[in-house]
Structures are given as structure tokens and as C-alpha cells.
Amino acid sequence: MALFMPFQIVASGIALPGCPETCGDIHIISYPFGIGPNCSLPGFELICNMSNGSPTPFLLINNIPVLEIVSYLWSEQPNVLVNNNITSICMSNATSSLNLSGTPYWINNRNKFVVVGCDIIASITFGNETNKHPGSCRTMGCYNPDSITYPYDNNFCSGAGCCQISVPEEVNYYQISLQSQNYNSSKQYNSSQCGHAVVTQSYNYVNYDELYVYDTLYQQQQMPLYLDWSIGNEGCKMAQANKSSYACIDNHSECVESDNGPGYLCMCSDGYEGNPYLEGGCQDFSVAIPSV
Ligand SMILES: *[C@@H]1O[C@H](CO)[C@@H](O)[C@H](O)[C@H]1NC(C)=O
Ligand SMILES: *[C@@H]1O[C@H](CO)[C@@H](O)[C@H](O)[C@H]1NC(C)=O
Ligand SMILES: *[C@@H]1O[C@H](CO)[C@@H](O)[C@H](O)[C@H]1NC(C)=O
Ligand SMILES: *[C@@H]1O[C@H](CO)[C@@H](O)[C@H](O)[C@H]1NC(C)=O
Ligand SMILES: *[C@@H]1O[C@H](CO)[C@@H](O)[C@H](O)[C@H]1NC(C)=O
Ligand SMILES: *[C@@H]1O[C@H](CO)[C@@H](O)[C@H](O)[C@H]1NC(C)=O
Ligand SMILES: *[C@@H]1O[C@H](CO)[C@@H](O)[C@H](O)[C@H]1NC(C)=O
Ligand SMILES: *[C@@H]1O[C@H](CO)[C@@H](O)[C@H](O)[C@H]1NC(C)=O
Ligand SMILES: *[C@@H]1O[C@H](CO)[C@@H](O)[C@H](O)[C@H]1NC(C)=O
Ligand SMILES: *[C@@H]1O[C@H](CO)[C@@H](O)[C@H](O)[C@H]1NC(C)=O
């Protein structure tokens, strides 16, 4: 999993008091995220599902498995890394969608829509409540599962057996359509013979391994997706006017405008670190680390 962790989180005691801070592999669940309705802000509730042996956290919204939470401002827009479903085209054309409208989540534009397979016409419409961004790409030639030739050069995913589309800014839904004449209902398919598409963390965001994209797409059911999040759907000025709902409650916290979609975020003031969403959450850094 180290491949997917461009950020380091160093903190503790950042859940709401009395609330669990871990679920399976996620060791730091910091407020506004939390397990259960009384431990989280609306939209940030996680379910820690114990039913298949190892505890797995899911966003209550859309039932999406969570891989990693970066829940307060470190140096960038905070993210949550989730597992996204892969859409496959085997015996017939396929469609799928994700709609996060009305939730705190926005699709980070370092993700990409990646399509692998034979002669697939892939369409994806990204959008938000007011704007739509339709796009399409086509994989040319036929990716032959019997003689895999990965494109190792700079032309990775430029059309031959693979094509991709960038994610626009400020979008919170997408609709996918995959069409092909190469796949038909008179043939038996296994997963490596089908075409696959997913909106996923861009391969060039971290040192993304091209082989990894192919292998994962062909073998697994899900791939990691970065979601940005923010509080509410108005900016700092409006949010600060209502003290009962304003989320930056620590005395040493500040409001920052979200840079993906409407809403705001909180951060600890200069010299303080911790969780700005909790009373007493921002700690004086110079006191916390004794000087020699
Ligand atoms: C949440 O808090 C409310 C009010 O304090 C309480 O009535 C309710 O039982 C709590 N729910 C859970 C799941 O703990
Ligand atoms: C936990 O996962 C199981 C199996 O995937 C599912 O049937 C169940 O509904 C889940 N429980 C909750 C509370 O989401
Ligand atoms: C993935 O599929 C499951 C089951 O259909 C659905 O509950 C979940 O919301 C989907 N996740 C995403 C990110 O679309
Ligand atoms: C997304 O969900 C919202 C709220 O549930 C709904 O109003 C909207 O029509 C949906 N958008 C799409 C493109 O399905
Ligand atoms: C799939 O889409 C292609 C291209 O639009 C079309 O020619 C073909 O008939 C479709 N196949 C099915 C089974 O609908
Ligand atoms: C459909 O599958 C059959 C059986 O594998 C194959 O002979 C035929 O060429 C396929 N048709 C197309 C249009 O690919
Ligand atoms: C899937 O099909 C490919 C190509 O025919 C074959 O090499 C591979 O062994 C098959 N995989 C499984 C799991 O059946
Ligand atoms: C302030 O926030 C509270 C809690 O979310 C809400 O009930 C109330 O309507 C808000 N007041 C105004 C003036 O928007
Ligand atoms: C929707 O996206 C456009 C950019 O495409 C942006 O200007 C607009 O503010 C967004 N609307 C909402 C409600 O986020
Ligand atoms: C925040 O400031 C208020 C007013 O100065 C003070 O009463 C309160 O104790 C402070 N809270 C914390 C957690 O320091």
C-alpha cells in the first residue's frame, strides 16, 4: 500500500473524545470523520464493517471502501483515498456512474479515467450541479491477452489497447459508457479478456507503475480514487456568520476556502498543529516539543 501514500500523517488523539480512532488498516480516523453518527459530521460517517474477518471502513455515503484519510490541512487540500469500482465490457456494452452531488466529496483532478481493452469507444461525462464536461476516447487495435506487450515507452496509454481522459476541476459526478463490437454474447469471457475502465489515481501522480495499471485493471475489481472534501457549500465568510454550524472550533484554528468546489476547510494557526475541528485540537508546537 506504500505506493498510495504521498502524505505522511503524524498525529494522535484527533477523533472526537470517546470515539474509536482505528478500523482495520486505518489507524487514524480524525474528526470530522468518525465511526457512527455521533462521532462524525454529516457526510463524514464511516461504518467499520467487521463481517468479512478483517475490519474494513466504508463511507456511509454510497458504501465506498476507504483506504486512507487525510483529514486536516497539511499542505494541500485534504483527501480521502477510496476504492473505486472497475467497469468491465465483456459480453455487452456497459454503463456505470458515481454521483457524489450533495455530499462533501469532489473528484480530485489528479485522477484519470483509464480504459484498457480491444477497440472500445469509451465516453465519460463529468459534471457538477451546473456544468457538464462530456469526453470520449477510443482504444485502437486489439490488446491480446495471449501475447501481452506492455507499452513501456512514453506512449503509455495513448490509444493502443489503452486510452485515458483527464478529470476536469470542480466535478462531483460522472457517467461512463463503454461500447465495442469486439465483445459479443456468443463467446465465454474471463476477466483478462474483457475490457476495463475506471476513474483512478493518475499513474503520473506518484511514481505510478504502468504495469501495475494493466495488471490491476485486469485482475481486480477495484482501484484507488482520490476524493477531495470540504465542509458545507459556502465560503468562509458565510460559514463564520453562523457560530452554531461553523466547523473551525478550536481557538487556534483558521478558515480556508476549498480549492475544489464550494465549501471551506479548517487549519491550525501558525505555530499550532493538530485537529482544528476539535476544541483544544490545535496544540502549540513549540510547547509540545521541548527544546534542548
Ligand atoms: C447519539 O447521541 C444521541 C443524543 O445524545 C443519542 O440519543 C443516541 O442514542 C446516540 N446514538 C448513537 C448511535 O450512539
Ligand atoms: C458489512 O458487509 C457485509 C458483507 O459485505 C454486508 O452484507 C453488510 O450489509 C455490511 N454491514 C454494514 C453495516 O454495512
Ligand atoms: C461500487 O459498487 C457497489 C455495489 O454496487 C456500490 O454500493 C458502491 O457505491 C460502488 N462504489 C462506487 C465508488 O461507485
Ligand atoms: C446526483 O444526485 C443528486 C442528488 O441525489 C441528484 O439531484 C442529481 O440529479 C444526480 N445527478 C445525476 C447526473 O444523476
Ligand atoms: C455496442 O455498441 C456498439 C457501438 O455503438 C454497437 O454497434 C453495438 O451494436 C452495441 N452492442 C450491443 C450488444 O448493444
Ligand atoms: C463473437 O464471438 C464468436 C465466438 O468466439 C467469434 O467467432 C466472432 O468472431 C465474434 N464476433 C465479433 C464481431 O467479434
Ligand atoms: C483467460 O483467457 C486467457 C486467454 O485465452 C488465458 O490465457 C487465461 O489463462 C484465462 N484465464 C483464466 C483465469 O481462465
Ligand atoms: C446555523 O446553523 C444551524 C445548525 O446547522 C442551523 O440549524 C441554522 O439554521 C443556521 N442558521 C442560519 C441563520 O443559517
Ligand atoms: C461547476 O463547475 C464549474 C466549472 O466547470 C464551476 O465554475 C462551478 O462553480 C461549479 N459549480 C458548483 C456548484 O460547484
Ligand atoms: C478558547 O477561548 C475562550 C475565550 O478566550 C476560553 O474561554 C476557552 O477556555 C478557550 N478554549 C480552550 C480549549 O482553550
Image (cartoon, helix red, strand yellow):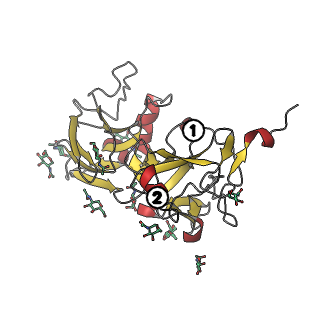
Which residue appears farthest toward the right when viewing the image? 292
Q: Amino acid at mark 2?
A: Ala
Q: What residue is pinned by disc 2? A: 241
Q: Residues within 10 Å of mark 2 (few under 14, many from 20)?
A: few
Image coordinates for residue 208, horizontal then vertical, percent: 48, 30
Instruction: Look at the image and tell me in which quarter the N terminus lies.
Output: top right
Q: Nearer the viewer, residue 31 or 254?
A: 254
Q: Secondary structure at mark 2?
A: loop
Q: Secondary structure at mark 1?
A: loop
- Please tell me which of labels 1 and 2 falls first in the chain: 1
Which mark identifies residue 5?
1
Q: Nearer the viewer, residue 185 or 63?
A: 63
Q: Amino acid at mark 1?
A: Met
Image coordinates for residue 3, horizontal then vertical, percent: 56, 35
Please give the name of the residue rendered at 50% of the width and 28% of the height, measured from the top-left corner: 207
Q: CA distance from mark 1 to mark 2?
A: 36 Å
- In the picture, residue 133 is in which quadrant? top left
Relative horizontal placement of residue 279, taking residue 215 as reference (left or right): right
Please give the name of the residue rendered at 28% of the width and 31% of the height, measured from the top-left corner: 161
